[in-house]
Image (cartoon, rainbow, N blue to C red):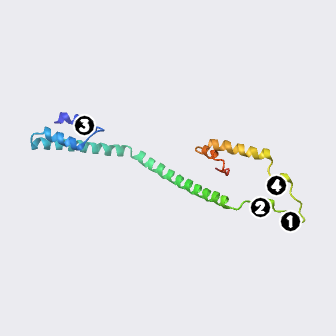
Amino acid sequence: MADNSPLLVKQLTAEDFNPARFVQDVTQQCVGGLELRQHRQLIQQIAESTSSELKKNVYRNYQQFIHTAKEIQYLEGEMYQLSHQLTEQRSLLSSLCDAPPATAALQAPPPAGQPEPAPAAREPAPDDLEERRRQLLQLMDRVEGAAHIREVPSRYQVYESDL
């Protein structure tokens, strides 16, 4: 049976290994209890050698495991910070969207005794507004997954420079 060991290892490590079928095949091949015990011992030897090989690999790569664990912990901290920043930004943007529009203040007449502001101070020039729109569209083209936002004309985009 010792010469069947590599064949048995190959059979046990096959992708389509079926334990029930394997046991059925072994019981059909073995004539007596002695052969079954020998087969069992051979499988135990393979299990022990596999276990010791796994332990050796863990010890061999121990420093790599430690380094990987530290990297994972560092990345986890950064993901937490990023999540916290995104939550803060979401709440800020929602509070900005819920705030009453400032157009009422622009439409109210100026207090008595103060001159009316120049038209350029009240409303940006059309060229400046068009330039801002163009910059926002370019930015949205660069942001992954944001191109579909422009497809709905009723949506508005809020530009936040750190974003």
Q: Is 96 situated above or below 143?
A: below
Residue found farthest to the bottom: 112
Query: On the picture, is 162 further left or further right than 105?
Result: left
Residue underneath mark 1: 111
Q: Which amino acid does label 1 sit on?
A: Pro
Q: Earlier in the sequence, mark 1 or mark 4?
A: 1
Q: What residue type is disc 2 on? A: Ala
**Outermost residue toward the left in this view:** 32
Q: What is the quadrant of the N terminus in the image?
A: top left
Q: Which of marks 3 and 4 is in front?
A: 4
Mark whose residue sits in front, 2 or 1: 2
Q: Earlier in the sequence, mark 3 or mark 4?
A: 3
- Does the residue at mark 1 contact the one at mark 4 (Cβ under 8 Å)? no
Mark 2 lies on residue = 104
Nearest to the observer: residue 160 or residue 42: 160
Q: Mark 3 points at which residue?
A: 11
Q: In the image, which disc is placed on residue 122? A: 4
Residue in the image at 62% along x and 47% along y? 149
> How far apart are labels 1 and 4 at the CA level?
15 Å
Q: Residue at x 48, y 49 (%)?
A: 71
